Image (cartoon, coloured by chain):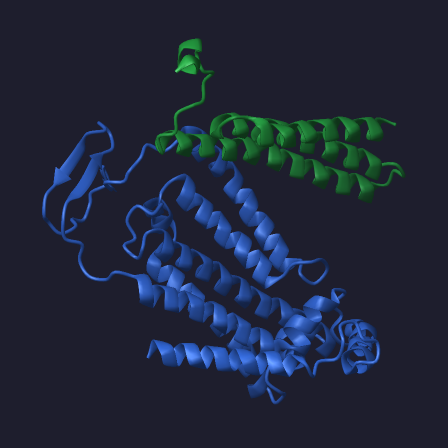
Amino acid sequence: MKKLGLLLVILSGALLLYATVDFPLWGDPSSPASLHVSPRYIEKTMEETSVPNIVTAVLADYRGFDTMFETTVIFGAGVVCFLLLRVLGGEEGDHYYRHLPTGVTIHVKGAKGKSLSGEFERIDMLWTPYDLVIKTACRIMIPFIQIYALYVIAHGHHSPGGGFQGGVILGASVILLAISQNLRTALRRIGEKTVGILCAIGVFIYAGTGALCLALGRNFLDYAALASVLGTDPVTARSHGILIVETGVGIAVMATMIWIYNNVSSAGRYDEGL
Amino acid sequence: MLVIALLVVGLVFFTGGGVGILRFPDFFTRLHPAGKLDTLGSLLMMLAVAIYNLEHFSWEALLTSLKIMLIVLFIFLSSPTATHSIVDAGIRAGMVPWRKETPEEKAE
């Protein structure tokens, strides 16, 4: 089975390498992309979509279908990490709890996890005392990182940025929380189920926008159809449509980042993590 | 003129940091130049860039300079924290700080 897989990989790789021979030369001015495609985008993007950043317009509008499946691939990566790594079922074995007001640690042997009252905190064998400096510095920085991430998502029309980049920064801020405190703290803020649902919602927003355009009588992902819903002219509607799908991409990427980190760092047990 | 001076001083700090990372004997001493000199070096260089940007004064340029100073603030917060956490991890992993060999140890 493994050999068959290897053979398939090598064959498809060889096929792809063979196909690259037919590509036009790098930077060839007479290649079809430079002759017809690029000039059209450069000349028409502003009047068709009113988005100053051509890259964003090409990414989310002209080639929206491609980006939709990129988002789906990211969603798939998160799901695969979850399916491969997550250890489901009750955790048998020893548990450690700490009484917060007194700092006393309690060791419960060979029992299933118990639900906790507010005064107790679940800790793990690998637990190490967390550093005040790191905690405080991260507590100061995380809100600003998140605001910056929202700015990157929302400002993708005018500057470098967009859903993917902003989503990664958002995810990184939560991961920073998990590193500076511990995984349990981060999971209390944004739980496993929330992450999974957000991940799916992000892809759903993207595909749903496309389907809405279809329902309104235009092509899939032709945001001009949203003009009647948004109450604007078709050109502005395309600009707004890009923002909507970028938001979807941002949510999906953020959730996937957190999801992958949670699973990989704790080897699927969701206990201490790093 | 001020810009050039700041850039040169920043460069000196960066060079010192680079040499220090290469030349110091162990983990902890290497982190020392990496944490300190890089922070100060980037502070000076960013300051130089911010001042250079203000050469033809306008409110937009001032805004850009303010954003650059925000980056400096971020580096000032995050870089020492990162160094601190790496040192912390090193101690927890059981690394022993380097010390100079005593004459008896050299003799052995």
- Relative to the observer, which residue lies in front, B35 or B71? B35
Q: Residue furthest right?
A: B56
- Answer yes or no: is residue A259 visible: yes
Q: Quadrant of residue B41?
A: top right
Q: Where does the image place residue B58, in percent across and percent down from the top left?
A: 86, 41
Q: Is residue B83 left or right of residue A219?
A: left
Farthest-out residue, front:
B108
Given residues B30 and A156, the one toward you in this image is B30
Position of residue A131 measured from the top left corner of the image (x, y, whole percent): 39, 31
Q: Which chain is blue?
A: A
In the picture, measured across the screen, residue A176 lies left or right of residue A59, that is left
Which residue is pictured at 37% across the width and 51% down the height? Answer: A265
Of the 4 image quadrants, the one containing the C terminus of chain B is: top left
> Quick check: A200 above or below B97?
below
**Which quarter of the image is occupied by the N terminus of chain B?**
top right
Q: Is residue B54 left or right of residue A180?
A: right
- Is residue A222 visible to the viewer in this orientation of the structure? no
Relative to residue A86, is residue A39 depicted above or below? below
Quadrant of the image occupied by residue A81: bottom left
Q: Quadrant of residue A167?
A: bottom right
In this view, the residue in front, B27 or B34, is B27
Report the residue at 66% width, 35% height from top.
Answer: B72
Q: Residue A230: horizontal and vertical position, in percent?
A: 63, 74
Q: Choose between A163 and B43: the one closer to the eye.
A: B43
Q: Is residue A71 above or below residue B22?
A: below
Q: Residue at x 82, y 39 (%)?
A: B53
Query: Horizontally, is A93 left or right of B40 in the view?
Result: left
- Chain that is coloured green in the picture: B
Instruction: Farthest residue to the left: give it.
Output: A110
Residue B12, position as x, y percentages in the image: 73, 27
What residue lies at 74% left-to-right and 33% top-to-bottom?
B45
